[in-house]
Amino acid sequence: MTNSLSVFRVQRGSFVVEFALVLVFFSSLLGMLVNYSVAINTKGQLDRVAYSLATIVAERRQLFNSSLDVCFPEQAGDCKKQAEEFYALVSASMGRMMSNFDKTKFGLRIEQVSLEKKGLNEGGSELEKRYDRIDKGTIAQCNVTTEAQTMSKSDAKRLLPLTTRGRRLPLYQVSVCYAVPFNLLGVTSGEVNHVISTSYAFARV
């Protein structure tokens, strides 16, 4: 009888341990699924914002009779103003889509590649690659790829459309990112995953 009770207690203890291990595994799995769902949903919202802003930047000439350039390097005030306006626009859009949107977790980068004619001392001209960038928010914390910055002049010549007036239209790269918890441990420890979305557009005239 004593032996039977001992065996029963051992089996019951083993069952409790196994149940606890299974419970921890499935709880972790559920937590990861929930947070990955949040990340995927956030990615969809960022895709929409990046595409919309890239379209607005590309249509600035038609919509607002504005310059094709998003920023003038020689005018620091103009760059800061453009960054503030674009950031306010996309932040407002994200706020409408996300009830718990936090601007301190959001970053924006707008890059422009263009080709401009540069006069030569002996006469004539040649095309020179120009690269401009606007950063705002927490974009520095995100690992954003910069194809626009690393593009060579020869690649730009092949890629940028040529107008009837002989000017190459600029290429815009819009990148947005937002920090979301990576898993349940991330919720409590502050560990986050930066979800990034990028969209491209050529200027339209």
Image: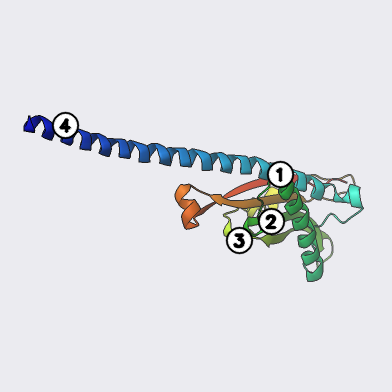
The earlier-in-sequence mark between 4 and 3 is 4
Q: Label 4 amino acid?
A: Phe
Q: Is residue 10 left or right of residue 38?
A: left
The alpha-carbon separation of the residues under discs 2 and 3 comes to 9 Å
Q: Label 2 amino acid?
A: Arg
Question: Would residue 160 be seen by someone viewing this image from the given angle?
Answer: no
Which structural element holds mark 1? helix
Q: Position of residue 114 (x, y in %)?
A: 76, 54
Report the front residue among 22 and 151: 22
Q: Which residue: 68% across, 46% down? A: 98
Q: Which residue is mark 2?
A: 109
Which structural element holds mark 2? strand
Q: Which residue is mark 1?
A: 97
Q: Which residue is mark 3?
A: 140
- Tag 4 near tag 3, CB within 8 Å: no
Report the front residue among 114 and 138: 138
Report the front residue among 26 and 7: 7
Q: Badge 2 local density, few (<14 within 10 Å), some, or many (20+)?
A: many
Q: Which residue: 71% across, 55% down? A: 111
The earlier-in-sequence mark between 1 and 4 is 4
The alpha-carbon separation of the residues under discs 4 and 3 comes to 60 Å
The earlier-in-sequence mark between 1 and 3 is 1
Q: Label 3 amino acid?
A: Ala
The alpha-carbon separation of the residues under discs 1 and 4 comes to 56 Å
Q: Label 1 amino acid?
A: Met
The alpha-carbon separation of the residues under discs 2 and 4 comes to 65 Å
Q: Which residue is mark 4?
A: 8
Which of the two marks, 4 or 3, is nearer to us in this view? 4
